[in-house]
């Protein structure tokens, strides 16, 4: 007789059902595991054997065959340990087989029988709930699984013995409660920034419309300081965004203690990051930094120091909002709709354009340094701003009176206007101006006659590409929202064009 236990295999953040089939038959003692399993899955045989012995059970001296169906789907990870062990226990009568019906099982086994945490419990719980199943998962992941549905049965044992006791009716496992970790450390505040009023304004515009932003200035000007304060003026994650972000973090194994957070992600990878680390990949096609920054901020400091091929690999996620990882036998898609914020020096020595300074290499120093950035990559950045050095006068002046909380309120009002506008147009899937494109962008951001005349002349003089033209419209629409205007005027177009001047200068160098 074949015993079946349901589990899942992960493709991106999707959990595909897998049927663990266990057969104990007469024959020479053997333990065979089939079904296109990777090394971590095949090693489950030894972990399961040791965990059962530690729990007071021994494998029968018979032929044991475990099949992971469908057999052509790659199986990766250690979360198959617990379903294999439960299937074996049901096959030898240690647990009632009917008690496992209607449950999807994930979990890794320690050699002493404890159930260890695994990655991907939240997507597994959502997939199980969609099939009408409950979930059996490690105790450390129970709070994470409870977010899938308040009505879904969730069993979160800490050991194999505890789970067997519950299934046999000797003890009762209570359902874990979902937990939202809304506290955490305080975010850096904009009131810490001295001077840089123009940069503060650009940061507010970027936050209001989720626009990509590039700061260019000498060392010590405060570029990184400004970027690190962007999360403090962004609104918290909506419930839908919260689940999307948490599912990616769950698959990547970065959720702490099973608690979710409504703070937007802020990822700042080092400039030595590889393409697989940035976009995703590896043997198991794990999510990269662009996916871990989904619905949040990806901050790239010292932008030209990144490998050009790594930066160019960001062009497609910036445009589509997804990261596609192709392998010979399968293709994985991770969400990657992030807001890019980057910082760079004007040249390798960092002092190009500084009054009274003459570089030994001349203009070629800045040209060679900025040429590491391709024109198509820069064209996808909405706001380009030169950040001047902070003077001693700025440092001795009183600190700014407006904190991040005041700026965040204006950003929230502007984003609420955008969401209402898109909902009225029948596009509730769009939330910020940066996501608008095509006819809907022309409908919401068509400027008045004076603005149209200015934009037409600027497009000809600045030689804006079609993408650059549309990005100016998106920024102008955000500026109008910040000012509470229903129409895009000449002043909004003029300010949006001012943020493109740096792009033209850097593209010319590239």
Image (cartoon, grey):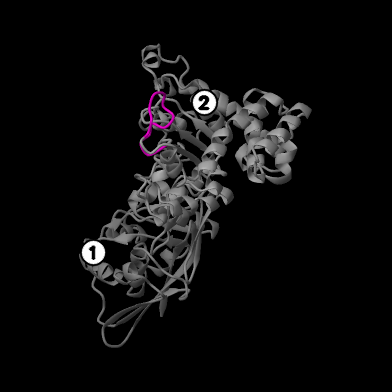
What residue is at 26 percent from the left and 67 percent from the top? Answer: 47
Q: Is residue 114 above or below residue 294?
A: below
Q: What residue did someone put label 1 on? A: 55
Mark 2 or mark 1: whose residue is earlier in sequence = 1
Question: In the image, is 118 to the left or to the right of 52?
Answer: right
Span colored in magenta: 347-359
Crowd class of label 1 (few under 14; some 14 to 19; many from 20; radius 10 Å): some
Quadrant holding the N terminus: bottom left
Characterize the magenta stretch by its predominant secondary structure: loop
Please report contact status of discs 2 and 1: CB closer than 8 Å, yes or no. Answer: no
Residue 146 shows in the view: no
Spatial CA span between label 2 and label 1: 54 Å
On screen, 78 above or below 220? below
Quarter of the image for residue 344 reads top left
As rendered, which of 231 and 43 lies closer to the eye? 231
Q: Considering the numbered disc 1 on the image, is that residue within a helix, a strand or a loop?
A: loop
Q: Residues within 10 Å of mark 2 (few under 14, many from 20)?
A: many
Q: Nearer the viewer, residue 34 or 304?
A: 304
> Residue 184 placed where, x, y %?
36, 33
Pick the front one: 54 or 73: 73
């Amino acid at each position: 007789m074949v015993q079946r236990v349901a589990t899942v295999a992960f493709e991106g953040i999707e959990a595909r059902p897998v049927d663990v089939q266990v057969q104990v038959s007469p024959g020479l003692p053997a333990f065979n595991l089939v079904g296109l399993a990777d090394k971590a899955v095949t090693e489950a045989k030894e972990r399961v054997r040791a965990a059962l012995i530690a729990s007071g059970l021994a494998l029968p001296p018979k032929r044991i065959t475990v099949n992971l169906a469908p057999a052509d789907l790659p199986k990766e990870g250690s979360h198959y340990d617990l379903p294999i062990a439960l299937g074996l226990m049901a096959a030898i009568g240690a647990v009632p087989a009917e008690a496992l019906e209607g449950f999807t099982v994930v979990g890794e086994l320690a050699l002493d029988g404890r159930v260890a945490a695994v990655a991907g419990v939240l997507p597994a719980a959502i997939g199980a709930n969609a099939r009408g199943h409950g979930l059996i998962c490690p105790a450390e992941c129970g709070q994470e699984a409870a977010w899938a549905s308040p009505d879904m049965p969730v069993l979160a044992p800490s050991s194999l013995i505890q789970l067997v006791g519950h299934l046999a009716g000797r003890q009762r496992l209570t359902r874990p409660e979902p937990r939202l970790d809304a506290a955490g450390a305080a975010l850096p505040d904009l009131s810490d920034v001295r001077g840089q009023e123009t940069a503060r304004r650009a940061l507010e515009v970027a936050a209001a419309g989720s626009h990509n932003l590039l700061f260019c200035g000498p060392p010590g000007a405060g570029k990184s300081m400004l970027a690190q304060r962007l999360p403090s003026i962004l609104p918290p994650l909506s419930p839908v965004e919260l689940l999307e972000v948490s599912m990616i973090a769950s698959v990547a194994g970065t959720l702490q203690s099973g608690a979710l957070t409504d703070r937007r992600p802020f990822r700042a990878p080092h400039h030595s990051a590889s393409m697989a680390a940035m976009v995703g990949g590896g043997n198991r096609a794990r999510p990269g930094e662009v996916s871990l920054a989904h619905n949040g901020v990806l901050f790239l400091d010292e932008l030209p120091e990144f490998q050009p091929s790594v930066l160019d690999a960001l062009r497609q996620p910036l445009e589509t909002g997804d990261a596609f990882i192709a392998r010979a036998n399968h293709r994985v898609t991770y969400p990657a709709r992030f807001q890019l914020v980057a910082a760079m020096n004007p040249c390798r020595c960092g002092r190009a354009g500084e009054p009274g300074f003459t570089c030994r290499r001349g203009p070629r120093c800045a040209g060679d340094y900025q040429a590491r950035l391709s024109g198509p990559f820069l064209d996808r950045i909405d706001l380009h701003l030169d950040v001047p050095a902070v003077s001693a006068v700025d440092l001795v002046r009183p600190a700014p009176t407006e904190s991040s909380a005041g700026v965040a309120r204006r950003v929230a009002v502007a984003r609420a206007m955008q969401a209402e506008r898109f909902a009225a147009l029948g596009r509730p899937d769009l939330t910020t101006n940066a996501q608008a494109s095509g006819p809907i962008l022309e409908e919401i951001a068509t400027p008045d006659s004076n603005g149209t005349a200015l934009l037409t002349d600027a497009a000809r003089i600045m030689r804006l590409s079609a993408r650059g033209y549309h990005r100016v419209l998106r920024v102008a629409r955000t500026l109008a929202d910040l000012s509470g205007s229903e129409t895009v005027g000449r002043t909004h177009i003029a300010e949006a064009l001012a943020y493109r001047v740096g792009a033209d200068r850097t593209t010319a160098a590239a």
